C-alpha cells in the first residue's frame, strides 16, 4: 500500500511537470506571433504628364578682356657692408741674442799620492766574562684534586658493586613483556655497617623501572663493601632485554 501511494505521487508530479512545460511552450509560441494587420486598399489613378519644352539657352561667350597688370616697383634695399674689424698687428719682438759667457778655465793641479797611514796598534781588549747567574725557578707543585670519599670508595669497589647489582637485579615480568628498557639513576646513603637508607631516584624513564631499581638497592643492604665513613652514593642501574 505504501509503495502504491509513492508511485501515485510520482506519476502525479510527472504529469504536473508535463502540463507546466506544455503551458510554457504554448504561451511562448503565442507571445512571439505578431497579430496580422488588416489589408488596406489604395486606389491609384494613372495620368500622363506633358513634358514642358525645354528651351536651350545659348550661353554667351564673353570675350576675356586683357587685364593690365600694375607693375609695383619694390623699394631697393641697400645692404650695408659689415664694418671690417681692424686687424691686430702683431708687433715683432726683436729676439735677444744670447751672449755666451766664457767659462773660466779650471787649471787642474797634479794630485799627490796619499800615503797610506797605518793604524796605530790598539792595546788588546780584555774580555770581561760576565757571569750569568741563573735564577733557579722553583716549580710549585700543583696540588692534585683530592678525591671525595664517595669517589674513592666507588673507584675501589666499582667492580664489586656492579657485580652485586647484576646478580640481584630485579626486572619486573610486566616490564619485560612490554619491552620496557632504560636507565635509572639511584641515590642512597651507605652506612659504615653497609646498610642502606634514604633510597631515591634522580632520573628514570619508567615508573615500573623506578620501583624495581629501589627494590634492588634495598635488597642489597648489608651486602655492599663497608665504607670507612657514611657515604651518599649515586649509582646508575641499566635495564636491557639484550
Image (spheres, rainbow, N blue to C red):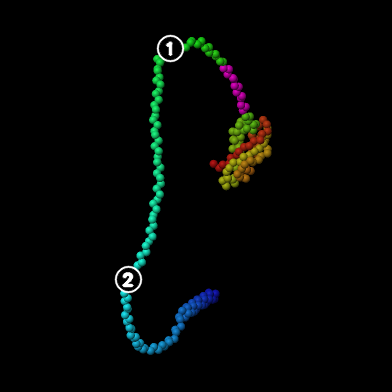
Q: Residue at x 45, y 12 (%)?
A: 117
Give the class, few, some or many, for how many residues have Cα within 10 Å of label 2's Cα (few <14, many ≥20).
few
- Residue 109 visible at all: yes
Q: Nearer the viewer, residue 190 or 42?
A: 42
Image-quadrant location for residue 39 = bottom left
Residue drawn at point x = 55 percent, y = 42 percent: 241
* Secondary structure category for the residue under label 1: loop
Q: Provide residue 21's location: percent of width, then percent of height.
A: 49, 77
Residue 163 appears at what percent x and percent y?
A: 59, 35
Q: What element carries label 2?
A: loop
Residue 170, percent from left and from top? 61, 41
Q: Give the range drawn in magenta.
A: 132-144
**Up-down: is 50 above or below 148?**
below
- Left or right: where does residue 122 sit relative to residue 57? right
> Mark 2 = which residue?
66
Query: 51 or 149, which is in the foreground?
Result: 51
- Decide: is 108 above or below 162: above
Q: Mark 1 points at which residue?
A: 115
Main SS of the magenta segment?
loop
Based on the picture, tell me whether residue 196 belongs to the magenta stretch.
no
x then y, percent, for residue 1: 54, 76
> Residue drawn 44% across and 84% down?
36
Compared with residue 141, is residue 242 higher up or lower down, i.e. above or below?
below
Left or right: where does residue 157 sit relative to residue 12? right
Amino acid at each position: 500500500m505504501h509503495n502504491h501511494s509513492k508511485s501515485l505521487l510520482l506519476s502525479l508530479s510527472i504529469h504536473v511537470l508535463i502540463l507546466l512545460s506544455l503551458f510554457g511552450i504554448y504561451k511562448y509560441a503565442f507571445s512571439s506571433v505578431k497579430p496580422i494587420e488588416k489589408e488596406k486598399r489604395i486606389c491609384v489613378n494613372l495620368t500622363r504628364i506633358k513634358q514642358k519644352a525645354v528651351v536651350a539657352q545659348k550661353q554667351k561667350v564673353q570675350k576675356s578682356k586683357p587685364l593690365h597688370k600694375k607693375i609695383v616697383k619694390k623699394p631697393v634695399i641697400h645692404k650695408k657692408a659689415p664694418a671690417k674689424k681692424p686687424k691686430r698687428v702683431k708687433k715683432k719682438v726683436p729676439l735677444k741674442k744670447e751672449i755666451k759667457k766664457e767659462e773660466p778655465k779650471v787649471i787642474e793641479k797634479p794630485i799627490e799620492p796619499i800615503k797610506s797611514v797605518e793604524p796605530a796598534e790598539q792595546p788588546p781588549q780584555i774580555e770581561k766574562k760576565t757571569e750569568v747567574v741563573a735564577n733557579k725557578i722553583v716549580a710549585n707543585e700543583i696540588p692534585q684534586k683530592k678525591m671525595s670519599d664517595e669517589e674513592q670508595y666507588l673507584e675501589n669497589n666499582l667492580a664489586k658493586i656492579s657485580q652485586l647489582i647484576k646478580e640481584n637485579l630485579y626486572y619486573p615480568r610486566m616490564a619485560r613483556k612490554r619491552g620496557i628498557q632504560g636507565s635509572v639513576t639511584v641515590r642512597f646513603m651507605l652506612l659504615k655497617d653497609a646498610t642502606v637508607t634514604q633510597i631515591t631516584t634522580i632520573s628514570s624513564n619508567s615508573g615500573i623501572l623506578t620501583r624495581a631499581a629501589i627494590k634492588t638497592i634495598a635488597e642489597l643492604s648489608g651486602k655492599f663493601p663497608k665504607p670507612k665513613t657514611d657515604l651518599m652514593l649515586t649509582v646508575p642501574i641499566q635495564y636491557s632485554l639484550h
